[in-house]
Image (cartoon, helix red, strand yellow):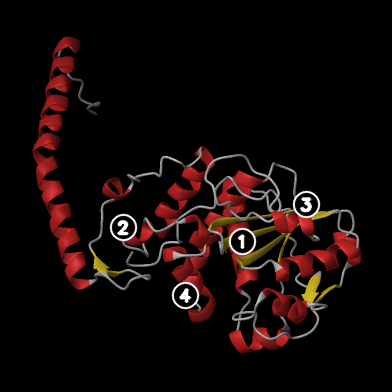
């Protein structure tokens, strides 16, 4: 029986043949490069013609950009390193939903701002300190922060999630929450993350609580990156809204406070006692909801209560000559 054939080529000859094959393969790749690039261009052109992207903010159609061409971001030179990260995260997660013009409308909340309520100050120069309102009325929560200013494309995305049930935006906004949390809180500083609860009647009308869904999306992002979901309790009845309230939209600050007074209830006091709790909502407007929710948690034993939102209104911007960006500006 014949055994396997053994090559009689010298080792040097084999090496030379291998080098020749590698060089030939590299030359083939160099030749294919322009062809593949041209094919990719044709593919993108066909995709743009058949399935054009429509911006969820301004409604404009725009071409599918290669990832490399959309990764460059022109930063505001006044942004700090952490704000650069928020800006970069927003551009990355918003890429499938927003055109390049609308992505640039995102403005991260940045210093100098109030150490407590997070409002940006009139002057862009200086350190963080307490604003006059927080000096007069300290309130129940320790610190409130937001990822971005409630304007431009970020405002449009929040509206689409809240009023149009556009759930495809949950994971991108959850990643934005995660990055804002990492920027403003130290590891181990928060024991528990809770959403601002929605009353059962409103839940039935809307069909979902956007704050709860944002917390769930953030928890998913957290588990993917760190496998740590201990801050996100599975129980949904620890903290509830005990009575229905009129919508806060359109109400002034005094009316908001009266409307929300006594609207929350801690059901499981043992779960919050001695804990540092982070409340999550979609938008911080006057702070009335956050103050009332934090007051209820503190009265039932919470050690500290902080607040994190996707967006925050900035009434000071009109006085700063730096008005919040609107779509199309």
Which residue does the numbered mark 3 point to in the structure image? 191
What is the crowding at mark 3: few (fewer than 14 residues within 10 Å), some, or many (at least 20)? Answer: some
Q: CA distance from mark 4 to mark 2?
A: 19 Å
**N-terminal label among 1 and 4:** 4
| Residue 132 x %, y % | 71, 55
Which residue does the numbered mark 2 point to in the structure image? 100
What's the residue at 33%, 46% (across, down)? 71
Labels 3, 4: front one: 4
Q: Secondary structure at mark 2?
A: helix
Residue 266 lies, with reference to residue 311, above or below; the image says below
Residue 275 lies, with reference to residue 8, above or below; the image says below
Q: Quadrant of the N terminus?
A: top left
Pointers 3 and 4 in contact (C-beta within 8 Å)? no
Q: CA distance from mark 2 to mark 1?
A: 24 Å
Which residue does the numbered mark 1 point to in the structure image? 309
**N-terminal label among 2 and 1:** 2
Q: Quadrant of the C terminus?
A: bottom left
**N-terminal label among 2 and 3:** 2
Which residue does the numbered mark 4 point to in the structure image? 160
């Amino acid at each position: 029986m014949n055994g396997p054939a053994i090559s009689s080529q010298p080792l040097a000859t084999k090496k030379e043949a291998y080098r020749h094959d590698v060089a030939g393969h590299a030359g083939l790749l160099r030749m294919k490069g322009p062809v593949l690039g041209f094919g990719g261009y044709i593919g993108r052109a066909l995709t743009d013609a058949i399935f054009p992207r429509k911006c969820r903010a301004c409604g404009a159609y725009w071409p599918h950009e290669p990832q490399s061409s959309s990764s460059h971001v022109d930063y505001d030179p006044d942004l700090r390193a952490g704000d650069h990260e928020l800006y970069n995260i927003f551009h990355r997660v918003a890429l499938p939903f927003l055109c390049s013009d609308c992505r640039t409308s995102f403005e991260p909340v940045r210093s100098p701002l109030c150490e407590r309520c997070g409002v940006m100050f009139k002057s862009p120069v200086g350190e963080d300190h307490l604003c006059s309102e927080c000096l007069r009325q300290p309130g129940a929560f320790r610190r409130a922060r937001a990822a971005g200013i409630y304007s431009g494309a970020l405002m449009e995305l929040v509206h689409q999630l809240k009023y149009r049930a556009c759930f495809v935006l949950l994971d991108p906004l959850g990643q934005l929450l995660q990055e804002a949390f990492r920027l403003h809180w130290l590891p181990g500083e928060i024991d528990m993350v809770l959403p601002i609860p929605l009353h059962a009647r409103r839940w039935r009308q809307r069909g979902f609580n956007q704050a709860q869904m944002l917390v769930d999306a953030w928890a998913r992002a957290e588990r993917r990156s760190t496998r740590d979901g201990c801050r996100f309790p599975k129980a949904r009845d620890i903290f509830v809204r005990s009575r229905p309230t009129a919508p806060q939209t359109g109400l002034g600050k005094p009316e908001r406070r009266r409307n929300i007074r006594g609207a929350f209830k801690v059901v499981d006091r043992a779960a919050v006692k001695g804990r540092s709790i982070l409340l999550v909502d979609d938008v911080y407007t006057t702070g009335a909801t956050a103050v009332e929710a934090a007051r209820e948690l503190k009265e039932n034993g919470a050690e500290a209560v902080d607040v994190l939102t996707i967006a925050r209104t900035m009434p000071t911007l009109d006085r700063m000559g730096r008005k919040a960006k609107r779509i199309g500006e």
